[in-house]
Amino acid sequence: MKGYCGARLFRLQTILQVWERRERGRGGLSAIECGAYRHRVIRAVVGKCETKLPTPGLSLRLHAMDEEYDVIVLGTGLKECILSGLLSVNGLKVLHMDRNDYYGGESTSLNLVQLWKRFRGDDKPPESLGASKEYNVDMIPKFMMANGALVRVLIHTNVTKYLNFKAVDGNFVYNKGKIYKVPATDVEALKSTLMGLFEKRRARKFFIYVQDYEEEDPKSHEGLDLNKVKTRDLIAKYGLDDNTVDFIGHALALHPDDSYLDEPAMDTVKRMKLYSESLARFQGGSPHIYPLYGLGELPQGFARLSAVYGGTYMLNKPECKVEFDASGKAYGVTSEGETVKGKKILCDPSYLPDKVQKVGRVARAICIMSHPIPNTSDSHSAQVILPQKQLGRKSDMYLFCCSYAHNVAPKGKYIAFVSTEAETDKPEVELKPGIDLLGPVDEIFFDMYDRYEPINKGEEDNCFISTSYDATTHFESTVQDVIAMYSKITGKVILLFQVLDLTVDLSAASAAAEE
């Protein structure tokens, strides 16, 4: 097969992509199954020949272990795939390896059989739940702010051409035992049942201040330096009560706990403006969007981006041991007895456990239901935030729900997640306040996973390690980690909030509207 040249490989890849789109469109194989099948076909055709597709094209050099790379990326989680794509676009020579035979790592999506195997071993899922291949259950479920950092990365890199999105139907907050729609503007504040009449007026004044605030326009500051004024002092100026502060800080600004109150108010105001801008972008009931077929599509989209710019991918590579020289600097990765050299190593915490520390645990429940979350206006997709103070906790709890409207489950089925930063070793007990809001569930799975962050200095040992995913149901903290890592590796800054064409069609239409 050594005569099987790059041009022919490129045509083969094109044929497989057409097949995948057709298969996915008719509800056939899942994203993971398609990717694995495509990978097996290419390996079978190429065999052991050394070949590289022309650029632009998809690099499938299966025996490129004798080369040196600018960056070797280990793991195909979302963060690693975003960085692989950004680094390749930046002109760096990237090799991307994974011990698994599928994309996504901890942020992958599972079909029903895979979900059962992961949590219930050899048991088989009941036939009443429908076809396994119609499920795409995200292991790290998160919505995307429509005007947020991840969407800007997608537009900046043109990965939007690989994905389709729909708007999320609703955003809600838990207060005094009930679920309320989150008001985001002065007009919505006046209509909200979350506040009394006088509180509505005070909240409206605060919303107007935030909406009118422009960092470059001193007239809009009303004499306040938000880089110095604490958030609690800004809120006190408007006389808002604790319940209003709760939904502003946690459901609008998306802070995970109350520590923001003693930090400069600028960050909270910017977060609130992002929420409002995202809400206005698609004129929907929520500021969030979500990809069809689930988040497993995102790593694959960025993997394609990397490959188009010459990045090389190797899945199903066992061990992937990082090698260090006598001075403690990483110089390569060994797998199957071969060592490939790289100037820098980028990976998730599982590849370098000695260079990370445990900083917390996430407790979560994965539920399959036959109905939307009650009291969310029959939303086919929704987020509900339970502020810490409402539950007497140290951090917030999050409800995430998606459904067949986003092609993540069969007709009539809903996937719901309840997650929080764990404070005990009993997720069944700890998550009960959120689970009780879901109503009857067909199936429920409980899980806990550790969160890690790096303790090394990448500039000293050439190792750049991502942090684990947190319990939040949005991507803003995830992308901030990506941006920070990119800057450390390249010495450059990604200007995501420069002028971008934000009119890009993301196919975002209300999921429920199609019913």
Image: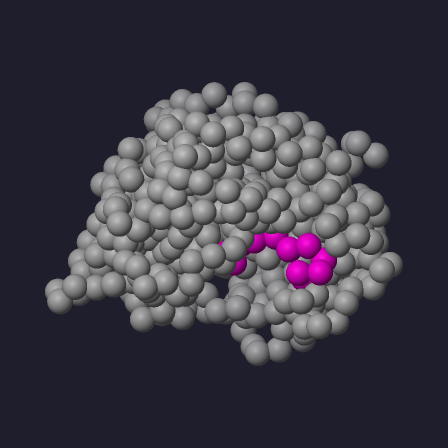
- Residue at figure coordinates x 52%, y 47% from the top left: 44
- Residue at figure coordinates x 48%, y 69% from the top left: 450
- Residue at figure coordinates x 67%, y 62% from the top left: 115
Question: Is 494 on the left or on the right of 106, as rendered?
Answer: left
Residue 249 falls within the magenta-colored stretch: no
Question: Is 281 on the left or on the right of 7, as rendered?
Answer: right
Where 354 sits versus 188, above or below? Answer: below
Indicate the quadrant where residue 385 lies: bottom right
Q: How many marks?
A: 0
Where 247 sits versus 495, above or below? Answer: below
x and y percent of residue 123 in the render?
Answer: 75, 71
x and y percent of residue 12 in the render?
Answer: 53, 33
| Image quarter hosting the C terminus | top right
| Image quarter hosting the N terminus | top left
Region of the chain picked out in magenta, as a range: 105-115
Where 141 sits versus 170, above or below? Answer: below
| Front residue of this view, candidates 286 and 42 | 42
